[in-house]
Image (tube, helix red, strand yellow):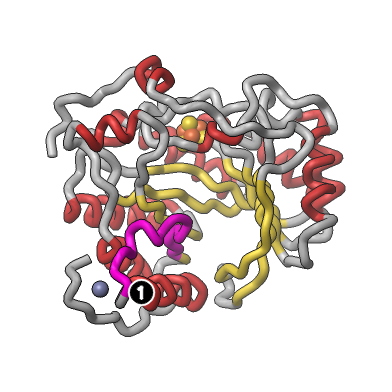
Amino acid sequence: MSSAAIPITTAEIVAARPSKNAVDPRRPYAFFVEPEATALGSIEDVATIFLTNRECPYRCLMCDLWKNTTDDAVPPGAIPEQIDYALARLPNATHVKLYNSGNFFDAKAIPPGDHAAIADRVRGFSTVIVENHPQLCTDACARFRDRLGMSLEVALGLETVHPRVLPALNKQMTLADFDRAVHLLLRDRIAVRAFILLRPPTLDEDEGVQWALRSIEHCFALGVGCCAVIPTRAGNGIMERLERDGLFAPPRLDSLERVLEAGLRLGRGRVLVDLWDVEKLASCPRCGPPRMERLRSMNLTQRVAPSIACDCGT
Ligand code: SF4
Ligand SMILES: [Zn+2]
């Protein structure tokens, strides 16, 4: 694959978008509880609340999270209200993810005036996990952790350490920005997880696997505790254009398997693969379901399970 048509501008990315979904600023747009492997090796329930809030100001090439966001800032009190709404309907869990399709420490997304009310609502959990752009990691993270009085984990999108692809993602972040954010968070005793893309645009299948693994290794060398690998997907308009132009193809299921297997074998920290929409990659009716189940099980046990043979070539 070539990088001839990259870079693509912010204006092109925005112009290619389909319309957003209708969202209610007083309701989270999704919430559920699911088990996850902990840093200590146990499996514990994690509540994930997808908060509705103002769209992230970054316009990454592969991002489709803006679909469930508002154009304008949500009113003060709306975020705590959303958390109340979700917690009243969710079963008990030990940890909570407050994911906001953007950056928790973006004052226009999550009003800082709501931090105290948010902390009050999640104090019964052992860990709070939020997502944030590396450039928005400041002392505000430690202040929020102090307010919580419990473990805070910040999820950062590294995406890739590939020196040509990372700038092409329009994330407006250098590898040095990412490293600085990780150092700052760890200094403040805030755990870090990283999102890593499997096969971002312009990489072929093997390069996709190799660079995902290099990215995982980079994260663990910095002290990141958990790497979550996300199969790059189309769905935001511009990615479909890249697909048509031969500059992007989603990864195959066996690439996701290879990355999880090799990542776990490093033994440096947790490696998880994102199984949202994995059915699209697991198209073979014979091996698809058991291979998805194997990935689910490896996510939880953090151990490599015997592989599942099939002649379908996926
Ligand atoms: S920083 Fe995250 S939420 Fe914002 S555009 Fe990039 S991928 Fe999407
Ligand atoms: Zn098969």
The quadrant of the rendering that contains the N terminus is top left
In terms of depth relative to the viewer, which is nearer, 240 or 188?
Answer: 240
* Residue 284 part of the magenta-drawn span: yes
Asked if residue 134 shows in the view, the reply is: no
Q: Position of residue 306 (x, y in %)?
A: 32, 84
Prevailing secondary structure class for the magenta stretch in the rendered image: loop
- Compared across the picture, whether 251 is left or right of 173 comes to left
Q: Which residue is drawn at 42% across and 79% down?
A: 303
Residue kind at label 1, given as amino acid type? Arg
In terms of depth relative to the viewer, which is nearer, 236 or 22?
Answer: 22
Q: Quadrant of residue 88?
A: bottom right
- Compared across the picture, whether 27 is left or right of 278 comes to right
Q: Quadrant of residue 112?
A: top right
* Residue 167 part of the magenta-drawn span: no
In terms of depth relative to the viewer, which is nearer, 48 or 29?
Answer: 29
Q: Residue at x 55, y 70 (%)?
A: 37
Q: Position of residue 166 (x, y in %)?
A: 31, 35
Residue identified by numbered label 1: 291
Q: Compared to 96, does 160 lie above or below? A: above
Magenta segment: 271-285
Residue found at the very far top of the displayed protein? 11
Q: Position of residue 52 (x, y in %)?
A: 68, 36
Q: Residue at x 69, y 59 (%)?
A: 47
In terms of depth relative to the viewer, which is nearer, 249 or 56?
Answer: 249
Is ligand 2 within 8 Å of the beta carbon of the residue shown at mark 1? Answer: yes
> How busy is the neighbourhood of tag 1: few (under 14 within 10 Å), some, or many (20 plus)?
some
